[in-house]
Image (cartoon, rainbow, N blue to C red):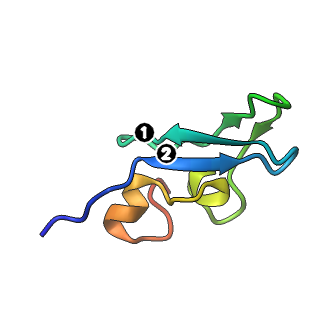
Amino acid sequence: MEKEIILQSTITCPNCGHEKEETMPTNACQYFYECENCKKVIKPQDGDCCVYCSYGTVACPPIQEDGKSSCCA
């Protein structure tokens, strides 16, 4: 049985706290994300593969599928 992959994640800006629900890409990790509120470009925390794994409510699709700690390394 294949895992159901969740594509919606609410990302929270670590700079201003703004939250926005986004649809995550299924074929790549998103390394940069610009907050629509404060315009700061955020990057993943050390050890995370993408901004969704660092600041989102749901890990990115490759992590959900494989369960590995780094999908794009």
Please tell me which residue is depicted at 38% across the width and 54% down the height of the picture. Answer: 6
Work out whether residue 4 can be spotted: yes
**Badge 1 local density, few (<14 within 10 Å), some, or many (20+)?**
few
Q: In the image shown, does 6 or 53 lie closer to the viewer? A: 6
Q: Give the side of residue 61 with respect to residue 48, left or right.
A: left
| Amino acid found under the numbered disc labelled 2 | Cys
Residue 29, percent across and down? 49, 45
Secondary structure beneath dot 1 equals loop
Q: Which residue is label 1 attached to?
A: 25
Q: Which residue is label 2 attached to?
A: 29
Please say if 26 is above or below 70: above
Please tell me which residue is depicted at 83% across the width and 34% down the height of the picture. Answer: 40
Give residue 54's quadrant in the image.
Answer: bottom right
Mark 2 and mark 1: Cα distance apart in space: 7 Å
Residue 23, percent across and down? 47, 39
Secondary structure beneath dot 2 equals loop
Q: Which mark is nearer the camera, 2 or 1?
A: 1
Please tell me which residue is depicted at 38% across the width and 56% down the height of the picture. Answer: 62
Residue 49, percent across and down? 56, 56
Task: State yes or no: discs 2 and 1 in contact (Cβ < 8 Å).
Answer: yes
**Badge 2 local density, few (<14 within 10 Å), some, or many (20+)?**
many
Query: Residue 68 shows which numbered tag?
Result: none
The extreme left residue here reads 1
Work out whether residue 50 can be spotted: no
